[in-house]
Amino acid sequence: MSRHQVRQQSVSLVSPTAAGARQLGSPSAAARFTVELTGKPDGSALAAVAGEVDYDGADAFRHAMATALKEYPVGLELDLAGLSFCDCAGLNVLLWVRRRAAATGCAVRVSSVSPRMSRLIDLTGTREVLGASINGAASRHA
């Protein structure tokens, strides 16, 4: 694959997983991330993000998160502890999620981050924007 070719990624809703959770993201080899949604009794959901989100996958990640916001308009709890890599394009999607949620009255909070995600958040000064609930969360995963 040359540097100028675009890797295609599709995002689709796949079959339910254990305990009623569902995964957003392509099960194909091209997918480098998953978003597992687990509904809660209050109508909100836990969105566990795992894998890698970079420039090439940012559009697919945005689509997956837009789907999550649409399906769970009450609120989303984002668990980012499974992210092994996230660049500024992925962080931009997370900031977009916060803005879109705020515009629609949806509550979004980040409950857990990986050490790499914690570093990106600190370097970019977005810890407060993404929510105070992530303070200290990285220490559980270090």
Image (spheres, helix red, strand yellow):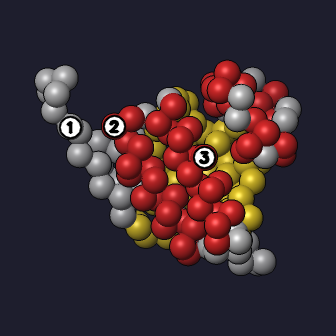
Q: Residues within 10 Å of mark 2 (few under 14, many from 20)?
A: some
Is there CB contact under 8 Å for labels 3 and 1? no
Spatial separation of the CA atoms under disc 2 and disc 3: 17 Å
Is there CB contact under 8 Å for labels 1 and 2? yes
Element marked by disc 1 = loop
Residue 112 as seen in the image, left or right of residue 4:
right
Q: Is residue 6 visible?
A: yes
| Image quadrant in which the N terminus is located | top left
Q: Position of residue 86 (x, y in %)?
A: 52, 32
Mark nearer the N terminus (1 vs 2):
1
Is there CB contact under 8 Å for labels 2 and 3? no
Q: Position of residue 62 (x, y in %)?
A: 46, 53
Q: Which residue is the site of mark 3?
A: 95
Residue 140 as seen in the image, left or right of residue 38:
right
Q: Is residue 21 visible?
A: no
Q: Which residue is the site of mark 2?
A: 56
Labels 2, 3: front one: 3
Element marked by disc 3 = helix
Q: Which residue is the site of mark 1?
A: 6
Q: Position of residue 71 (x, y in %)?
A: 56, 75
Mark nearer the N terminus (2 vs 3):
2
Q: Residue at point 36% right, 64% down?
A: 12
Residue 65 as seen in the image, left or right of residue 131:
left
Amino acid beneath label 1: Val
Q: Position of residue 21 (x, y in %)?
A: 58, 66
Amino acid beneath label 3: Leu
Label ID, residue 85: none
